[in-house]
Image (tube, rainbow, N blue to C red):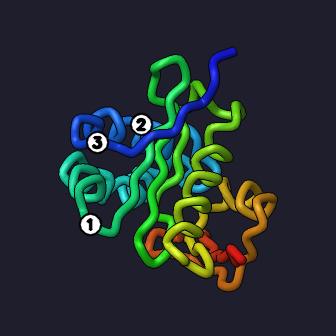
């Protein structure tokens, strides 16, 4: 089995990373959007090549790519204040440790930056993963599209 490799995203990753994130949301987050077009579109609205490139190139933004055997398997990102903004796996690589590897990389980099914690807003689909990784939920809400989400945090100390 090929090993997961994590690397810093580059501008040349923009289109493939954007397509991976959009595909992951569309195919793996079905319990969150139930295939309802307005909810799917709400989840995808800011997942554009232009935004992905901006996230990759922005100072204080840390975007990582996971690869397996040279194929892009996942995308993770966080801001300089510890907010995890992306953590998506390609459907064909689900349950192969990609999300865990990306999250470990994010937490390691956040600790290197001296951040006390990481925070995120999770979908219901991802919430069990983040709970198992030590995150705790502190606010459950419903967004404008009627989708449940949970604000979660993890101390890095």
User: Does residue 119 lie above or below 122 as drawn?
Assistant: below
Q: Secondary structure at mark 2?
A: helix
First of labels 2, 3 by sequence position: 3
Q: Which residue is mark 3?
A: 10
- Residue 66: percent from left, percent from top: 51, 36
Q: Secondary structure at mark 3?
A: loop
User: Does residue 107 lie above or below 13 as drawn?
Assistant: below
Task: Judge depth for marks 1 and 2 and give the one in front.
Answer: 1
First of labels 1, 2 by sequence position: 2
Q: Disc 2 and disc 3: Cα gap in Å? A: 15 Å
Residue 124 image-quadrant placement? bottom right
Task: Judge depth for marks 2 and 3 and give the one in front.
Answer: 3
Q: Residues within 10 Å of mark 3 (few under 14, many from 20)?
A: some
Q: Which residue is mark 2?
A: 20
Residue 149 image-quadrant placement? bottom right
Residue 143 shown left or right of residue 124 in the figure: left
Q: Secondary structure at mark 1?
A: loop
Q: Which residue is mark 1?
A: 59
């Amino acid at each position: 089995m090929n090993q997961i490799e994590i690397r810093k995203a580059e501008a040349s990753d923009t289109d493939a990373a954007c397509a991976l994130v959009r595909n992951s949301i569309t195919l793996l987050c079905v319990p969150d959007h139930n295939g309802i077009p307005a909810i799917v579109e709400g989840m995808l609205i800011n997942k554009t090549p232009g935004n992905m490139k901006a996230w990759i190139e922005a100072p204080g933004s840390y975007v990582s790519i996971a690869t397996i055997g040279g194929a892009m398997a996942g995308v993770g990102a966080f801001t300089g204040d510890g907010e995890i903004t992306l953590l998506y796996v390609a459907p064909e690589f689900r349950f192969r440790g990609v999300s865990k590897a990306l999250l470990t990389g994010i937490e390691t980099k956040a600790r290197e930056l001296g951040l006390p914690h990481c925070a995120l807003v999770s979908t219901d689909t991802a919430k069990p993963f983040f709970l198992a990784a030590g995150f705790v939920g502190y606010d459950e809400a419903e967004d404008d599209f009627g989708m449940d989400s949970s604000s979660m945090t993890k101390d890095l100390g």
